[in-house]
Image: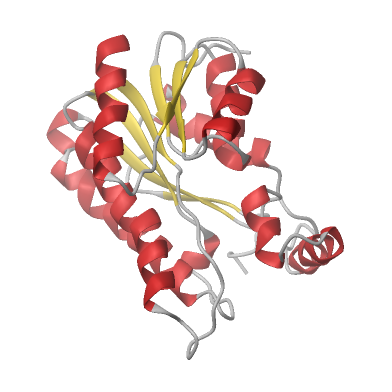
Amino acid sequence: MTQRLNAKIAVITGATSGIGLAAAKRFAAEGARVFITGRRKDVLDAALAEIGGRVVGIQADSANLADLDRVYEKVKAEAGRIDVLFVNAGGGSMLPLGEITEEQYDDTFDRNVKGVLFTVQKALPLLARGSSIILTGSTAGSTGTPAFSVYAASKAALRSFARNWILDLKDRGIRINTLSPGPTETTGLVELAGKDPAQQQALLAALAAQVPMGRVGRAEEVAAAALFLVSDDSSFVTGAELFVDGGSAQV
């Protein structure tokens, strides 16, 4: 590895599987000291064992403000600052208009909008000058998908956050970018089809057929793009939305 994050302090929320886990592995391999969060202790412990190296796990729900306070108290005590903040925690479910419930709306917006807002806001005292923030968006925020409007709207909000926050933080030299994956083979994606492996594979095949590159992405490919956004290689990139989608939102 090139050690592009040598001696950097990185915090990644929602890093126990999929894109977050892949990013934690890549950032650690590139020299960062990594703090990760996850809601379930057993899954968090498994992720820590898989990542190895200088990684610290904190059990936390990003939609819970008291949990966020605990996260940053630990980061402050053990590292004193944050150079990289990858706000990746989130999720959603599918319901068509006419069947959307208040519970689904609250769950999605709490995880994807409220959680992101306060994850960033509560990190501000620890963010070093010139630090980099990534918000995990989605191609769903720019395209239409049946039964996915609540999730899509929550991800579109993040794009707006980035555009505005770079102006709020410009005097501190903090960069904020949105990383928007397309269909990526992760647990969160395949479980939209339920627990049946055959249905999960059918979902992946259907999604691959819609991607110009003819396949779904890998979490490691998105992590590589995340590394670009948090490294000095992207020192003049801020307020942008980087699609890692095989062209699916570009045609």
Instruction: Tell me where residue 16 appears, x and y as whole percent.
Output: 56, 35
Q: Residue at x 28, y 54 (%)?
A: 161
Instruction: Tell me where residue 155 appears, x and y as whole percent.
Output: 42, 61
Outermost residue, bottom direction? 98
Q: Quadrant of residue 58?
A: top left
Residue 124 appears in view: yes
Outermost residue, right direction? 198
Residue 79 appears in view: no
Q: Is residue 228 left or right of residue 184?
A: left
Q: Nearer the viewer, residue 9 or 221?
A: 9
Q: Is residue 181 left or right of residue 185?
A: left
Q: Residue at x 39, y 14 (%)?
A: 8
Q: Is residue 175 left or right of residue 229?
A: left
Q: Nearer the viewer, residue 54 or 69?
A: 69
Instruction: Tell me where residue 99 appears, x and y as whole percent.
Output: 50, 86
User: In this picture, is 213 found above or below 4?
Assistant: below
Colouring: secondary structure
Q: Nearer the viewer, residue 163 or 140?
A: 140
Q: Quadrant of residue 78?
A: top left
Instruction: For the N terminus, give its image quadrant.
Output: top right
Instruction: Tell me where residue 196 appears, x and y as whole percent.
Output: 81, 62
User: In this picture, is 44 found above or below 250?
Assistant: above
